Every structure is written in structure tokens, then in C-alpha cells.
Image (tube, grey):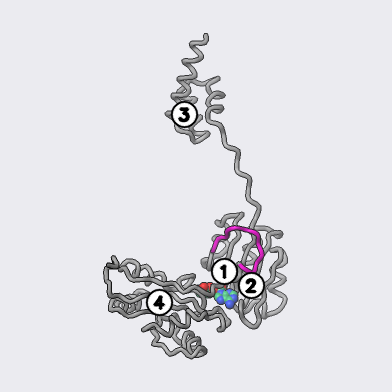
Amino acid sequence: MTGRKHPMTGTLYIVATPIGNLADASPRALEALRAADLVACEDTRTTRGLLAAHGVAAKTAALHAHNERAAGEQLLQALREGRSLALVSDAGTPAVSDPGALLVAAAHREGIRVVPIPGPNAAITAWSACGFLADRFLYVGFLPAKPARAIAALDEALPLVLYEAPHRVEATVAALLARFGPQRELVIARELTKKFEEIARMPLRDAPAWLQAGPHRRQGEFVLVLGPGEAKPAAPALDPGKVLGILLESLPASEAAKLAARITGAPRNALYREALARGAAGAKRK
Ligand code: SAM
């Protein structure tokens, strides 16, 4: 007993493909593409290029941002009927700033087996080459149309990994400089794994000039990795008992408890009981 809703369903393989260097297709990825009944691609021409380069014959179908719902339903039907499906995007890992998540979600809903075949991803590739000493980073992906506002809302201290298009990279770097200041480190990773790959690390103040240094510097594909900022020291925690004691010097118990709760976030009832107990103890001592 598999526990699946449709025990005879096919399998959905999520197959990562190269982000530039065709040799980065893993043997397992190629095997999955070869074995699948159908390869769902963002752009069938792009994927056919990859398949042809590796001598893989496969039947392809389009699944992209504009037909994800309608085409997804047909692909789901193929899975329900027991066919296996390999999902790829134009480059890198499907469903990472790329279509695919709707189909994966539908597969989970229907109890269809989802098998990821890991491989290239631009964000992780850039992060691995940035050299920032940090245990975590925030994957931002593509910023919305007005980057300055989105950047203003970002955490100050976390390293950030952003995808950017060539026609917006200068504006985004300018917005990062305005928000995070000239000393914050930035890695510009362009054309990763390709012939003209460049990975340059610099303080943000030098980034506009780096991009201006030649027209090629503003061409191709970009990942921007912003280094970590200085974490702000946490505000020292207020001691609710101490605050209550100070307030009780000049206020009645209920008022003191109310204000101490507002100042420290401690529960008001508990503070009130504490205030009454202190009052009773004080009265006994007198
Ligand atoms: N799913 C992909 C992945 O796993 O990385 C990301 C797809 S997203 C639509 C495309 C963006 O990824 C590009 O605009 C660029 O920011 C980044 N990217 C993809 N390939 C790249 C490369 N070879 N070098 C630098 N950035 C790349």
C-alpha cells in the first residue's frame, strides 16, 4: 500500500540544467531527461539545444509563466495517467525564480511522487564564490519594478542574493549604495560558468565605476551578492519587577502594573498581583 491517492500515477522529476556551461548537466539529469515520457520546458527551443548537445531524444511540451495553469493541468493529467514527466526551465533549477511551483504543488496535492534532481543554480553558484563569512543569506531573487522601495524594506544586516537583468543592474547597484552605504561589500557575478564569466568583489562605492568600465560589464546575466552588515546589538531587556518597583514609588498598584506591562511587555495581571503582594508585605513590615 503506497498511501497515494492514485497508486498508478507517474513521477514528476524536477531537473536542474546548466546556467551556461552545457557540461554542467549531471549524468542523473540527462538520464531523467532521456527516460521521461515528456519533458516540460519553459522554452522548447532552448531545451532542445541542451538535449541535442547531449544526444538526448525526448518529447517536449511548453510550460512557461504565461500558460502555467492551462498547460499545467494537461501535464498533471499525463501524470495521473501514469506517464513520467521531467520539468526543466531555460537554465538552472526549476521553480527558483522560474515557473514550476504550481505544477509541483498540484502534484503534492494529488499524491504524485515529486523527485528533485539537483544541479546548477545561479544564486548558490554566486554565493559559493563570494567568500562572505556568514551562515545564512536572504535569497531575494528579482526585485520588483521599483527596486529602491523594495531595497529600503530589506533587513540591514543579512547578506542578500539578488538576480538582476542587464538593463536594470546599474539602477539596482545605485539603490543598494544609497541604502547600505559605500563601505558595504558587493560581489558582482556575471555570466557564471560561461566564457566571459566575471566575479568581482568590491566596496559598494566602487561598483558603479566597475559597471561603467566597459559596455560588456553591463551585458549578460547577473547575480549580485551583498555582504553582511553589522548586526545591531539587541536592546538590553528591561526587568519587569524593577520597573514595577520604581513605578510603585509614586503610583497605586493598578496604575503601576498597567504602565509596567506597557513598558516591558510582561503580563499586566501578573504584575498587578506582584504589586499587591509587595503592598501587603510593606504593610506587614510597618
Ligand atoms: N532558475 C534559475 C536558477 O536556478 O538560478 C534562475 C532563473 S531566473 C529567470 C534568471 C536569472 O538568473 C538571470 O536574470 C540572472 O540574474 C540569473 N542567472 C542565470 N544564469 C546566470 C549566469 N550564468 N550568470 C549569472 N546570473 C545568472
Q: Which mark is residue 3?
A: none
The reply to whether dot 3 and dot 4 touch (C-beta < 8 Å) is: no
- Identify the element where label 1 is drawn: helix
Gap between marks 3 and 4 measured at Cα:
56 Å
Residue 25 among magenta residues: no
Q: Nearer the viewer, mark 2 or mark 4?
A: 2
According to the image, label 1 marks what residue? 124
Is label 2's Cβ within 8 Å of ligand 1? yes
Q: Residues within 10 Å of mark 3 (few under 14, many from 20)?
A: some
According to the image, label 2 marks what residue? 189
The x and y percentages for residue 173 are: 64, 67
According to the image, label 4 marks what residue? 66
- Name which quarter of the figure residue 181 lies in: bottom right
The x and y percentages for residue 72 are: 35, 76
Q: Residues within 10 Å of mark 4 (few under 14, many from 20)?
A: few
- Name which quarter of the figure residue 243 lies in: top right
Q: Nearer the viewer, mark 1 or mark 3?
A: 1
36 versus 125 height, above or below = below
Instruction: State which region is magenta.
Output: 128-139
Mark 2 or 4, nearer chain start = 4
Residue in the picture at 71% in, 63% down:
203
The reply to whether dot 2 and dot 3 touch (C-beta < 8 Å) is: no
